Image (cartoon, coloured by chain):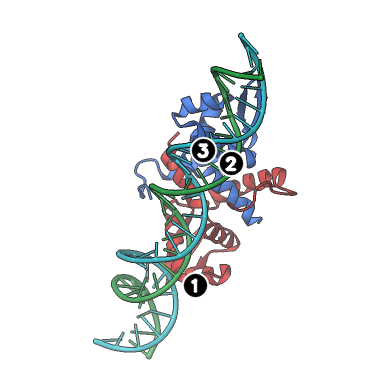
Chain colours: A red, B blue, C green, D cyan
Amino acid sequence: MKCHAYNMFFETIANKTRLAILEALQKKPMSVTDICKSINQEQSKVSHNLKLLTECHFIDVKQKGKKRIYSLNKETIIPLMDLVKKHVEKYCSKECTRGKR
Amino acid sequence: MKCHAYNMFFETIANKTRLAILEALQKKPMSVTDICKSINQEQSKVSHNLKLLTECHFIDVKQKGKKRIYSLNKETIIPLMDLVKKHVEKYCSKECTRGKR
DNA sequence: ATTTCATATGAATTGCTATTCATATGTTAT
DNA sequence: ATAACATATGAATAGCAATTCATATGAAAT
């Protein structure tokens, strides 16, 4: 197992802001400004996190006028989220043993 | 999306030590001591991390004599790792753009 | 009952990541 | 060329998780 790559994969996805971005992009591709509005977060914060998501190839960008349109890499993210959903539904449905850490 | 549960799922798995434990348990169920030897880490560190993995139902325990045998929840972890493996092979094969953060 | 082996746990500290703020860069229209 | 909009980036700080160390708990053997 390429442990470093795996670790980076999970570390990148294991973040409230980045998860919110990924969720937002499931609906449709969006510009940075739109993402900010959609998840109600500050622009520089969003940009920093978009960078990490892009580097991990969870999302793609293309320039469109002065905007940069980010879109989801559905091939990976959708099945991944499905897996997690199943797990969460099975084990965390009622009460989650553990609170926020 | 139950964002908190998703976040906890990923945060729990996004850790060098815990990934190593999960990998070790893919071979076979093991006691704490065996895990320590297998991944070459200290006992209290391993125990703390086993707790988190257990709370997320990534692993199970059963008592056997004075040992506690931990085993992998293969139903979730194996397909998950397969997904990540594919992604990593596709996008991170040669050079990973990004170094350790 | 006590010792030994096995594991868990609490609390302090270390270490790292996320956010923030200020500013730079890039793109288009005028 | 300059202004206005859109996004990216660097650096400092804030915030949180990981590790460590000491110790407690638990199980079985003597």
* Mark 1 surroundings within 10 Å by alpha-carbon count, few (fewer than 14), some (14 through 19), many (20 or more): some
Q: Is the residue under label 1 in contact with that under label 3 (CB below 8 Å)? A: no
Which residue is found at the position 54% from the left and 41% from the top?
B83
Name the quadrant containing residue B80: top right
Q: Is the residue under label 3 in contact with that under label 2 (CB below 8 Å)? A: yes
User: Which one is nearer the viewer's eye here, B19 or A83?
Assistant: B19
Which residue is found at the position 59% from the left and 49% from the top?
B8
Q: Chain of mark 1?
A: A
Residue behind mark 3: B18
Q: Position of residue A12 (x, y in %)?
A: 48, 51
Label tally: 3
Q: Which mark is residue A33?
A: 1
In the image, residue A46 sits, relative to residue A90, either above or below, namely below
* Mark 3 surroundings within 10 Å by alpha-carbon count, few (fewer than 14), some (14 through 19), many (20 or more): many
Give the foreground label among 2 and 3. 2
Q: Position of residue B60 (x, y in %)?
A: 65, 32
Identify the element where label 3 is drawn.
helix
Q: Which mark is residue B52?
A: 2
C-alpha span from label 1 to label 2: 37 Å
Badges 2 and 3, same chain: yes
Residue that sits furthest to the right in the current view: A94
Q: Position of residue D30 (x, y in %)?
A: 61, 9
Horizontal relation, residue B58 to residue B34: left or right: right
C-alpha span from label 3 to label 1: 36 Å
In the image, residue B29 sits, relative to residue B4, either above or below, namely above
Give the foreground label among 1 and 2. 2
Name the quadrant containing residue D14: bottom left
Give the foreground label among 3 and 1. 3
Badges 1 and 2, same chain: no
